[in-house]
Image (cartoon, helix red, strand yellow):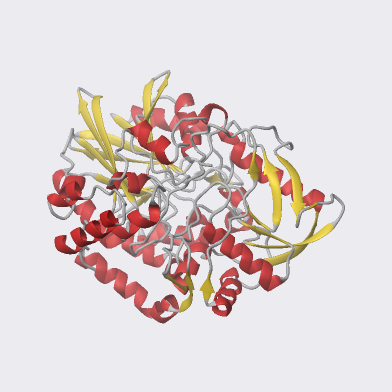
């Protein structure tokens, strides 16, 4: 793995310009190897580096940001619910440049061919080392969703990512998808692999019998003479969004009251800086910042929002910075505090995109990655088909990767309707690119992967869609309990996100005919949360479909008709 030469890069830039694509990459490249993009001068005396939701992506990837990320109620027109030009305008980012490509979906295909892939732990390691060299004793924080999301992570039960994070130099970690490896596996890693190396923190996980803490609620460190507390916040709704039996002895929840007690305890022990390493999701973090005082910053994850600058939330104790650092290893957040006389006097924050062309691969990390991937090389590289269109996942209602999965499970299983979970993770494939088995696993690698075929009445289908819709669009963030909206195949419907519970989903139709409440329909799905559900792994079902088709034509997205969203800055269309 090596960075592209300056000459090769400028040749591509010239070709893109000749094709009429206004990209402004030359200022980035002029200083050599991305120095202008990554030239981040040291500030202050407390330094925090933050990545989150990498979803086990060790290699550089393509990743398209969403074109639909609706803001509802008090979130309307505010970060993180800004897409495309709305986001660029809000944060003063120049259109057509490398940062515009990093933070938005705009001109994605052309920009991706010019700027190349993002992420990759070998390239991230180079950036971390560079920043740490200028920031003595900087802490590297992992916001979770790290041990899940790839074939190698699934097959190694997260061990590939555990070893990579130890080598990367992670200091403190929070969790979410990690718990779908099962509580015993999580404890094994924390108690053995992480012992005296990485602190796994969670103030909101307790035993279900006596309410005892399962993990340490926070880590108290001293940096350059300043005591810093990092409090962990696991995804509050883990047992609801995933199979409960995988962590049946633990309770979760937001637990504002306990968070306040934890903040107060850390302050009493001398912490001059208190940050929360959170997997709440940004909307929940923004609300928490109004309710819990004494938190200087919430470094957030879960919702995969790449937000260029912190949102500053005023509260009874002063103010709290709220950030969210994207996903898939695409970004590294850098938060510097200047602490004087026991108080924060100022801060600097930058969310740095990780472009593999601009950051040479760290040799030691590259060697580890090659080693952990070697036993699976033939399986990972199997070419299943070629995609003629762009395949991506992110978006409130659907993505072309999701549509492909829906098309596959419906055709293979002979279903009228298909449901696919609203997962936010998953990599992107450019038109003309081969779909490998590794790419398919990037979309489906979970520990409860069974494909299902059930009969559901029209009434049951509506109830399901209403319930999931409320999880996403409830105006109170504390009632938002999952990912994006379930992806739907075959069924057309109208959605009014601003409506109340039970009133968002209307005009459900199948092949142009109204869905009947008491009629049964064959529904294909996958990822059942009920214990004991048996079924073929969804990746095998989709792989058969891809091998049979060989060439995948551009997908026509089945999306609902949206009502009441005109002018919403999180929506294009």
Image location (x, y in percent) of residue 110: 35, 56
User: Looking at this rendering, what residue extends furthest in the top direction?
Assistant: 316
Q: On the rendered structure, is 38 left or right of 352?
A: left
Query: What quarter of the picture does the C terminus occupy?
Result: top right
The correct choice, above or below, for 163 with respect to 384 in the image is: above
Residue 16 placed where, x, y %? 28, 57
Q: Is residue 71 left or right of residue 490?
A: left
User: Residue 73 or 570: which is nearer the viewer?
Assistant: 570
Determine the residue located farthest toward the right in the rendered image: 518
**What x and y, as percent, mark residue 313?**
41, 25
Q: Residue at x 37, y 31 (%)?
A: 90
**Which corner quadrant holds the N terminus?**
bottom left
The furthest residue to the bottom: 378
**Residue visible at 69% across and 32% down in the picture:** 500
Of residue 81 and residue 11, the one placed in the foreground of this image is: 11
Looking at the image, which is closer to me, 12 or 319? 12
Residue 357 is at least partly visible in this image = no
Whether residue 10 is visible, yes or no, is: yes
Q: How many marks?
A: 0
Taking the spot 35% from the left edge, 73% from the top edge, the residue there is 372
Q: Nearer the viewer, residue 77 or 197?
A: 77
Looking at the image, is 571 positioned above or below residue 157?
above
Locate residue 501 relative to residue 18 in the image: left or right.
Answer: right
Q: Above or below — where is 445 with respect to 488? A: below
Figure quadrant of residue 546: bottom right
Q: Position of residue 485 (x, y in %)?
A: 60, 48
Relative vertical location of residue 11 with respect to residue 468 in this rendering, above or below: below
Q: Residue at x 19, y 58 (%)?
A: 10
């Amino acid at each position: 793995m090596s960075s592209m030469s300056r000459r090769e890069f400028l040749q591509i830039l010239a070709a893109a310009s000749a094709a009429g694509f206004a990209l402004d990459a030359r200022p980035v490249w002029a200083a050599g190897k991305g120095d202008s993009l990554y030239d981040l001068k040291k500030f202050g005396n407390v330094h925090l580096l933050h990545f989150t939701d990498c979803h086990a992506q060790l290699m550089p990837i393509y990743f398209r940001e969403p074109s639909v990320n609706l803001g509802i109620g008090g979130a309307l027109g505010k970060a993180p619910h800004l897409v495309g030009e709305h986001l660029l305008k809000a944060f003063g980012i120049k259109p057509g440049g490398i940062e515009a490509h990093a933070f938005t979906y705009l001109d994605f295909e052309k920009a991706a061919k010019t700027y190349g892939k993002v992420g990759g732990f070998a390239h991230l390691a180079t950036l971390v080392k560079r920043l740490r060299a200028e920031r003595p004793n900087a802490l590297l924080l992992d916001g979770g969703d790290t041990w899940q999301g790839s074939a190698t992570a699934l097959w190694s039960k997260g061990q590939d990512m555990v070893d990579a994070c130890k080598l990367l130099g992670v200091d403190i970690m929070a969790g979410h998808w990690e718990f779908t490896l099962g509580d015993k596996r999580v404890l094994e890693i924390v108690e053995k692999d992480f012992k005296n190396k990485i602190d796994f923190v969670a103030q909101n996980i307790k035993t279900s019998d006596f309410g005892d803490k399962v993990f340490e609620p926070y880590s108290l460190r001293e940096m350059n003479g300043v005591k810093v507390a990092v409090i962990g916040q696991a995804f509050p709704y883990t047992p609801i969004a995933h199979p409960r039996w995988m962590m049946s002895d633990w309770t979760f929840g937001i637990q504002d009251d306990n968070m306040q007690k934890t903040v107060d305890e850390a302050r009493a022990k001398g912490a001059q800086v208190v940050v929360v390493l959170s997997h709440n999701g940004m909307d929940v973090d923004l609300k928490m910042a109004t309710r819990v005082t004494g938190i200087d910053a919430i470094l957030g994850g879960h919702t995969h929002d790449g937000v260029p600058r912190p949102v500053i939330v005023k509260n009874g104790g002063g103010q709290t910075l709220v950030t969210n650092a994207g996903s898939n290893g695409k970004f590294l957040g850098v938060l510097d505090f200047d602490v004087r006389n026991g108080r924060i006097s100022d801060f600097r924050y930058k969310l740095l995109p990780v472009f593999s062309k601009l950051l040479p691969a760290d040799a030691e990390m590259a060697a580890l990655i090659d080693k952990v991937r070697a036993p699976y090389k033939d399986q990972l590289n199997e070419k299943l088909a070629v995609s003629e269109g762009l395949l991506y996942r992110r978006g409130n209602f659907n993505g072309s990767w999701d549509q492909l999965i829906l098309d596959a499970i419906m055709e293979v299983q002979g279903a009228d309707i298909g449901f696919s979970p609203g997962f936010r993770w998953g990599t992107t494939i450019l038109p003309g690119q081969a779909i490998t088995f590794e790419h398919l696993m990037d979309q489906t690698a979970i520990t409860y992967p069974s494909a299902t075929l059930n009969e559901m009445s029209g009434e049951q289908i509506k109830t399901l869609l209403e319930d999931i819709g409320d999880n996403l669009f409830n105006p109170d963030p504390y009632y938002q309990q999952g990912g994006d909206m379930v992806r739907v195949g075959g069924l057309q419907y109208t959605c009014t996100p601003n409506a109340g519970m039970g009133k968002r989903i209307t005009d459900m139709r199948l092949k142009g005919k109204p869905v009947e409440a008491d009629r049964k329909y064959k529904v294909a799905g996958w990822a059942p949360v009920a214990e004991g559900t048996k079924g073929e792994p969804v990746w095998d079902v989709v792989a058969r479909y891809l091998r049979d088709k060989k060439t995948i034509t551009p997908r026509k997205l089945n999306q609902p008709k949206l009502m009441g969203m005109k002018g919403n800055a999180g929506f294009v269309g």
